């Protein structure tokens, strides 16, 4: 199956009444619903799972090739189990998450998963494919 994972940052200045009155209820260039969005696509996914309020183990490698693990608390994970036994995690800190949504299309064997994030850019840190509240990132990792 094919899986699409979407990250969208909600625009706090979006005005639904304005959109309804002047643009038939749709967003416009000057009144957009999102300030940022990105989509990842995976093919050949066997299954998926949704994990709420989990600790995420982030593995990073320093310049010398030595690996370190950091625990990121309270994240929501959308996990894809890929053919061949691998898995791929997409995670967002619960503290910056507004809501999630999953849509399945059986005809095309496609799952779409959406993270709607309600934070400003300075309060989060992008570590692809994660969106982590900067307060949850270990200080050693920010150096």
Image: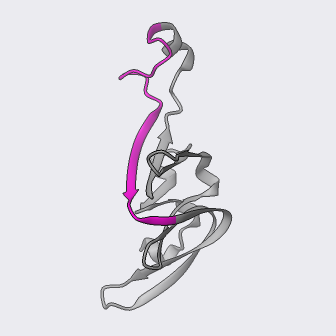
Its colouring scheme is: one colour
Q: Residue at x 35, y 23 (%)?
A: 29
Q: Is residue 131 above or below residue 16?
A: below
Q: Residue at x 44, y 47 (%)?
A: 108
Horizontal and vertical percent position of residue 25: 50, 16
| 11 or 89, nearer to the observer | 89
Q: Residue at x 52, y 52 (%)?
A: 123
> Can the viewer see residue 1?
yes
Q: Can you say which quadrant of the picture contains the C terminus?
A: bottom left
> Can the viewer see residue 79?
no
Residues drawn in magenta? 22-46
Horizontal and vertical percent position of residue 1: 45, 58
Horizontal and vertical percent position of residue 128: 40, 63
Q: Would you say 84 lies left or right of 72 here?
A: left
Q: Is residue 90 above or below residue 123?
A: below
Residue 16 is covered by the magenta coloring: no
Q: Would you say 27 lies left or right of 116 here?
A: left
Q: Is residue 12 above or below residue 9?
A: above
């Amino acid at each position: 199956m094919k899986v699409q994972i979407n990250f969208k940052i909600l625009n706090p200045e979006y005005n639904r009444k304005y959109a309804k009155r002047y643009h038939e209820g749709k967003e416009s260039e000057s009144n957009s619903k999102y300030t940022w969005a990105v989509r990842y696509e995976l093919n050949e996914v066997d299954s998926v799972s949704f994990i709420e309020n989990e600790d995420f183990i982030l593995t990073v490698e320093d310049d010398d090739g030595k690996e370190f693990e950091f625990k990121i608390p309270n994240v929501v994970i959308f996990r894809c189990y890929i053919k061949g036994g691998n898995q791929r995690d997409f995670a967002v800190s619960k503290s910056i998450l507004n809501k999630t949504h999953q849509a399945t299309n059986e005809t095309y064997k496609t799952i779409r998963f959406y993270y709607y994030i309600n934070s400003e850019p300075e309060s989060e840190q992008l570590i692809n494919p994660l969106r982590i509240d900067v307060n949850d990132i270990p200080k050693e990792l920010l150096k």
